[in-house]
Amino acid sequence: MIDPPMGLVAELTHRCPLQCPYCANPVALHRARAELDTATWLRVLEEAAALGVLQLHFSGGEPTARKDLVGLVSAAAGFGLYSNLITSGVLLDEPLLARLARAGLDHVQISFQDAEPDNADRIGGFAGGHARKLAAARAVRQAGLALTLNFVVHRQNLARVPQMLDLAESLGAGRVEIAHVQYYGWALPNRDALLPSRAELDGATVVVEAARQRLKGRLVVDYVVPDYHALRPKACMGGWGRRFITVTPAGKALPCHVAESLPGLDFPSVRERSLAAIWRDSPAFARFRGTHWMPEPCQSCDRREIDWGGCRCQAFALTGDAARTDPACEKSADHALMLAAVAARGVTPPDFVYRRYAGATETVD
Amino acid sequence: MNEETSIPAFAAGVKFRFDTLRQKWVILAPERMFLPDEPAIEILKLVDGARSLGMIIDDLAVRFDAPRALIAGDVVTMLRDLADKGVVRW
C-alpha cells in the first residue's frame, strides 16, 4: 500500500514575464498552445483531492498568466484543497487579488530577486518588476491573505540578506524563504555566475540564524541551504514519489518538477490516465520510491529514510547516472565534483544566460 | 505572553481540519503542514478567536479532571511552540 501524496504542484504555464537565470523550469519551455485546457485541470484537481492531496501549489512559469486561474482556485476550494499561489507578483493587482481571495485562495508567495530594486530588476530581466512586486505584496495583505516573500539567493545578492528580512517584516509577511539556488534547470549553466563562496555563505547563515531567534512568533524564516557547501543531501521533495506530484503545463505527471530532465523514464500524462492510477502504477514513480533502488553508501546508511538518497536530478546532472548517491553527500564517491565546482568559480561572475524560449537571443546587456 | 485574558487565534493562512481520508487532524499553513499530537488537537479545537487562554484552560481542566496549574503549564507551552511555528497568534 502506497501512502497518498500530500501535495500537488500545478504548473499551469511556462509563460512568465521574468527571465531569472536560475529558473527551475526545463531549458526547453512549453508554449501556450501545448498547455492543458481548463476542463482537464478541473478534473486533475478533483482527482488530487480524492487521492488524498491536502495542499495545492499553483505554480509555473507565472500562474497568473492563465486567464482561468480564479476559476481553478474556486474549484480547488470546493474540493477542500488548501491553495498556495506561487507567483512573481508582477501581474497581481488589487482587483485580481480581491477575486482570488473571494474564490478561496489561502496563501500567496511572491518571489523577489533582491532587496535592492535595480539589481532585482537586472536579475529578473524585467525593468520595473521590483516596484510591481512591492505593490502586489501590499495588496495581498490588504486582501487579508497570508503572504510569504521568497528570495532566491546567490553570490550576486547574498550580501543583502539583512535587507531582505527587513523587507519581509515591513510588508507584513508571515513567512520568508531565503533559498539558495538549486543547480538544475537554468541554474546549472549559470552556476559560476551564482555560486557563493564558503565565506559568503557562512556570513548569510549567521544573519539568518540570528533573525530566526529575533523574529520568533512574528515571522517564520525558512532557509534552504546550498548543496555545494553541504555535507548531507536534502530530502528532495520529501522522497521520490512519496509526498508530491507535479503536473507540467503540458500534462506530464512527475515526482518532482525537474524530473523530466532524467532519461529513460516514461512519465505518464494526465490527459490519458487518472492521478490515482499514475501514483499507484507508474513505473517512473516507482523507480526511485523508497529505499530498494539505493546504491551504497545509501543502502546501509542510517539516514536513508531521512534524506531518501537526496536529489535524483542532481545525481544525473553531475554524474550522468540518476541512480547514484547525490554528490551533495560527503559519503558520495562524487562529492569532489561539488568541491571542484566551488574551487573553479571565478572571482568575477560571468554574464547570466537568461531564461528564454528557444530561438530567442541568449543574453541581454 | 501568557496573560489568561489574551485570545489565541490561528495565524493568517492557517487551517486546522480533519482529513477524512487519513482519519487524522492536520494543520495546513503556507507551504507547510503539521500533524498535531493528541494534546495539541484538544487545545486547537478550542482555539476559535473568541475563547481566551483562561477559558481554554478551564475547559480542559474540567474535561480531563486534572489540576488547573498543570493544564495551564501544558497549554502555554504548547501554544508558545505553535506560535513559534507561525501557526497561532496570541
Image (cartoon, grey):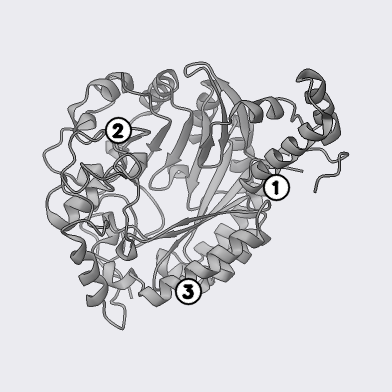
Mark 3 — on which chain does it sit?
Answer: A
Q: Which residue is mark 1?
A: A142
Work out whether mark 1 precedes mark 2 in sequence or the reverse, and give the earlier one: 1
Q: Secondary structure at mark 3?
A: helix
Residue at 30% x, 33% y is A241
Q: Quadrant of residue A306?
A: top left
Residue at image location 65% in from the left, 44% down from the top: B81
As helix, strand or loop, the secondary structure at mark 1 comes to helix
Q: Is residue A252 left or right of residue A106?
A: left
Q: Quadrant of the N terminus of chain A?
A: top left
User: Where does label 2 land, which residue?
Assistant: A241
Q: Amino acid at mark 2?
A: Gly
- The amino acid at mark 1 is Gln
Tags 3 and 2 in contact by the CB under 8 Å rule? no
Residue for badge 3: A203
Please determine whether, in this image, residue A213 is positioned above or below residue B48. Answer: below
> From mark 3 to mark 1, how far is it between C-alphas?
35 Å
Q: Is residue A67 visible?
A: no
